[in-house]
Structure formats: C-alpha cells, structure tokens
Amino acid sequence: MELSPNVQRIKYAIRDIVITAKEVEKQGKKLYYFNIGDPNKFDFDTPDFLKEALIEAITHDKANYYSDSAGDSQLRQEIINRQKRLWGTDLDLNQVLVTTGVSEAISFIGSALAPGTEILVPSPLYPSYLSYFTFNDITPIQYRTIENENWQPDVEDIRRKITPKTQAIVIINPNNPTGAVYSPNTVKKITDIAGEYNLLIISDEIYDLLTFDKGSFKSTTSLTDVPVLELNGISKTLISPGWRLGWAILRDNTGKYDAFWEALAKQSRIRLCASSPIQVAVSKILNKESDYLTPVIKKLRERSAYFSKRINEMDDLSVIPPKGAFYAFPLIKKDIGDREFVIDLLKSTGVLFVFGSGFGELGNGHFRSVLLPDIETMEKALDLVENYMKTLNY
C-alpha cells in the first residue's frame, strides 16, 4: 500500500516520547510521568456538577442523537454568553462552531487553506499546529518569543516575517508549552499588526481561566476590532480532557472570512457532529459554576512555585516561572541535545519529560514539564533529576 508523503510530516513529541517510556517501564523501571497535560491522571477530577449534567443529558434529555454539525444551538448560545460574561464580547450564533476538541479545529483550519499559505506561529508552540499545517502543505513560520522576558512574543519579529503569502497570525495564550501569559498590551500590538496587513488572528485560549495572577489574561476579542478566530473548549478549565469538546468562534464584521468559515463548516458536516450528550451537558453548566477552579489554581500555583524553585537551584538548569496553564519549560545549560537529554534522563531515573525541540525551533535546548503531580511526587522526581544533573559529564 502506497502512503501519502504528508503522513511522514506528522510528529507529536508529547506522545511520541511515550513509546520510549513504555520500553523503559517494561524493564521494571518506576516512571514519573511529567509529559502529558492531563489533570485527571493526577489528583484532579472532572467536577461533579458536569458529570451529573452528562447523566441527565443521557437519561432525562435522551441526547443520544446526531446534533447539528455546527453544534447544539443551546451550547452555541451558552458559548456566546460565556464570552460576553467573561470578556464583554458580542458574538453571532452563526459564527460558533463546536468541534471535537481544539485539535479538530486546528485540523479544519489547515485543511481549509490553500497549499503554500504561510501562517505565523509562536515558537515554542503546541506541536499540533506544526503537524496539521505541514500535513496540509501550509507553511508555519515561527516567530520568536523572548525567554528572558517571560516568553513574551517579539512583536517586531512578527512584523519582519510577514510576506505576501502570510494569511494569519497564531497566538497561544496562556501558552503551552512555556506557561507564559501574554500581556494585553503585547496582544494588542500583535492585533494592530494584523489589522495593518489585513491578516486573521487565530487565538488559542484553551487555558483562559488557568492563570496564577488574577486579571493578567484578557481574551483577544476584547482587545481589538480586527477579525479573530478564537479556539477554546472544556478540556482544561472544566478538567475534562477525555470528553473532547471544543469550539471555534469567528468574530468578523467585514465579511472577508465568510468563505473560510464555510470551509470549516463543510468539514464539520462530513464528520457529522461532536458528541451530542456532552454538548447538552455542557450547555447546562457552562455559565452556572465558577468556584470550582479556586482550589485547582491554588494547587497549580503552589506546584509551579515548588517546581521553579527546585529547577533554579540545580546546576545547569533554569526555568522562567510560569504564569498560567500547567507547564514549565526549563533550559538545559549543558552541551547536550534536548532529545538526548530527555531520553537519557528517562532511562537513568524514570522521570519523563518532553524534549523541547518537539515544540518548535526555539524549543531546542529545553524540555517541557507538566506541573500537575502533587508536591510529594514532584519532590521524589526532582530529587532524581538533581542527582542526575550532578553525574553529567558532557
């Protein structure tokens, strides 16, 4: 069977490294998993009110049918209500598309655009953007984020990299993998450039409520009048990654992106719909609960502070303390490839991180860690990392 050459472009370091980890585990090594951003693998759980809403949707509402391909109308309305409640942004029901997680939305975007299109993406970045875009012959042009400035985007680097082929600028805020929260002033400067060059902003805000400093994050749609395609969902802020429910929102008053939006909608129709029971369940609670994240953020803030302190005390490692999401992106100061470092550390200690080069050009020489394990587990794992660092002789 002849395979598409595009398949060879698919890389996803976050799960690719697990193949090596399973081989190490088979040899009897205890593993400490710091690779996948799934809170439910640790001491976090999907809120009871969401679980109860799903049971109600399946039983009382009998929501076991195919829903509208664009999404359940009540859920889309609640997504609009959420945007208004949190960020003061008015949206159109017909410009909300429910997807099977944000990953599907990224896939739709890549498939909708003409081959040869260039899209500016931050570096480091979530690797799905690289794979979905290159799979569809879209060229991701990586713009710099500045490590010693809390991983803020280099606005002038964005401007320098715009060409006649550029169609959009991606913002990932709060950021995976660095844990950065972009300042509203920086985001506004990026959107001003988009307006100047007539570009679409694609704003990934899946971690929007998971910030450690209250008020530090503002949704892109609240900061600009230029067209914005926002990507969001329930995986992170409703602690339900396995439910696979996300959405795309187009805020465009110009009509320029009508054909693009229809191209996304067409793809939603050929895959029928996102899970109907989950859509109905989420529509009931999306704007009714708010306190459940308080203990979650408290845990993450404490774990982030502990992780950052320990890493910055080690020889040949350093990290910019995260401001949101649940990731950190330490720098390796030794002359060793980041992939080699991660694999050798895994085999030596059982501690599993993800090599930074899997997150783009500026990920080289780094690794990504989740901040989800409890402090006791972190302490054990970081003790092993500290001892390992003392043995390096490269």
Image (tube, helix red, strand yellow):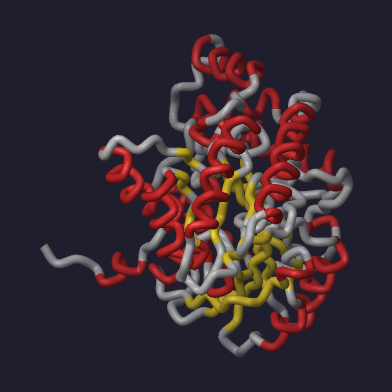
Residue in the picture at 65% in, 58% down: 178
Q: Is residue 107 left or right of residue 198?
A: left
Q: Is residue 353 left or right of residue 343?
A: right
Q: Is residue 181 left or right of residue 97?
A: right
Please state which of residues 349 and 266 is positioned toward the viewer in this rendering.
Answer: 349
> Can residue 264 be seen in this snapshot?
no
Percent across and percent down for residue 368 are 56, 55
Please state which of residues 82 and 294 is positioned toward the viewer in this rendering.
Answer: 294
Instruction: Give the mark count.
Output: 0
Q: Residue furthest top?
A: 60
- Residue 391 versus residue 372 in the image, above or below: below
- Residue 99 versus residue 225 in the image, above or below: above
Q: Report the quarter where the N terminus lies.
A: bottom left
Percent across and percent down for residue 83 are 78, 44
Q: Which image quadrant is residue 377 in?
A: top right
> Can residue 196 be seen in this snapshot?
yes
Please state which of residues 259 and 354 is positioned toward the viewer in this rendering.
Answer: 354
Percent across and percent down for residue 67 are 49, 33
Residue in the picture at 54% in, 70% down: 334
Percent across and percent down for residue 13 are 43, 57
Residue in the picture at 64% in, 53% down: 328
Q: Is residue 45 left or right of residue 80?
A: left
- Residue 265 versus residue 382 in the image, above or below: below
Q: Residue furthest left?
A: 1
Residue in the picture at 73% in, 46% down: 208
- Residue 353 versus residue 237 in the image, above or below: below
